[in-house]
Amino acid sequence: MIIIKRKTEIEKIKEACKIVAECLLKIEKYIEPDVTKFELNQLLETWIRKYKAEPAFLGYRGYPAASCISVEEEVVHGIPNGRVLKSGEIVSIDIGVRKNGYYGDGARSYGVGVVAKDKQRLLEITEKSLYEGVKLARTGNRIGDISNAIQSHVELNGFSVIRELSGHGTGVQLHEDPPVPNFGKKGKGPVLKKGMILAIEPMVSMGTSKVKVSPDGWTVITFDNSPSAHFEHTVLVDEEPVILTRTE
Ligand code: MF3
Ligand code: CO
């Protein structure tokens, strides 16, 4: 069942999303060679709690941390640990925030230090694919329109979308209906209505679209160990889509 949010609910979801956006903006200047995943996670958790909010991922299905921090071949759900970031790597940071019982969800990938041209391109194409999807999150369109726009942008540029993981509804729960796949056909899937809230989140690999779960039981890794990127916004469906996790 897809929840249509009331105005009062949307206001609360907006607050949670604003915290997500602030954190993903603030963390950027801490991303540099030699910082550990653990240190970044600590900062994020402290900031979220300062906003009198809770990290929504902590304890979710037993997940052990406030954020997911995924480096290079790690696509998503990377557990913050002592891994040291190195110049040239891609790091993807994903956070969920619960504020007054309502959720916001967002992610972005960053280059560490100096990043090679092909990885820079991966970052740009993945972010652009998110915006290509977001543009279509408007009343009367269908989920498949969003999915297809993301897939087309990624594949026309020679990269692969991860098919085993999807975006999702969010707001009242962290994960709600409908799934928002990063591939699909125009004109298919549920019709979008004003008041739906979607977490749209392309996960893109430079190589294969196949992934596996690492022995820690969480970290999703590209099967060929190629680098990957992940960008996510929580978006309100309306006549014009509204990005709730935007900073500016
Ligand atoms: N980041 C995922 C999403 O955007 C959820 C992570 S759940 C966790 O949907 F358990 F890994 F934290
Ligand atoms: Co999400």
Image (tube, grey):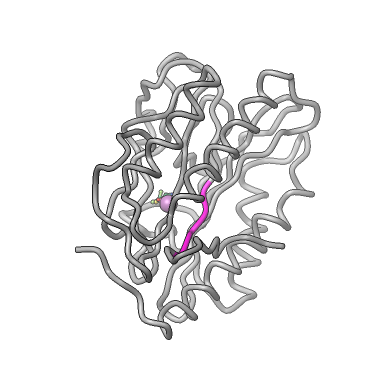
Which residue does the image show at 63% across and 59% down from the upper left?
44
| 124, 42: nearer the viewer | 124
**x then y, percent, for residue 158:** 52, 17
Q: Is residue 248 left or right of residue 59?
A: right
Which residue does the image show at 57% across and 79% down from the upper left?
52
**x then y, percent, for residue 83:** 61, 34
| 215, 226: nearer the viewer | 226
| 241, 97: nearer the viewer | 241
Q: How many labels, in total? A: 0
The correct choice, above or below, for 36 with respect to 134 in the image is above
Q: Is residue 67 left or right of residue 237?
A: right
**x then y, percent, for residue 16:** 52, 71
| 92, 140: nearer the viewer | 140
Q: Is residue 75 left or right of residue 18?
A: left
Quarter of the image that includes the C terminus: bottom right
Q: Is residue 8 located in the magenta-colored stretch of the structure?
A: no
The correct choice, above or below, for 88 with respect to 202 in the image is above
Magenta span: helix, strand or loop, mainly?
A: strand
The answer to which image quadrant residue 228 occupies is top right
Which residue does the image show at 33% across and 58% down from the upper left?
140
What span is colored magenta in the figure? 232-236
Residue 67: tell me if it is visible. Answer: no
**Outermost residue, bottom side:** 8
The answer to which image quadrant residue 192 occupies is bottom left
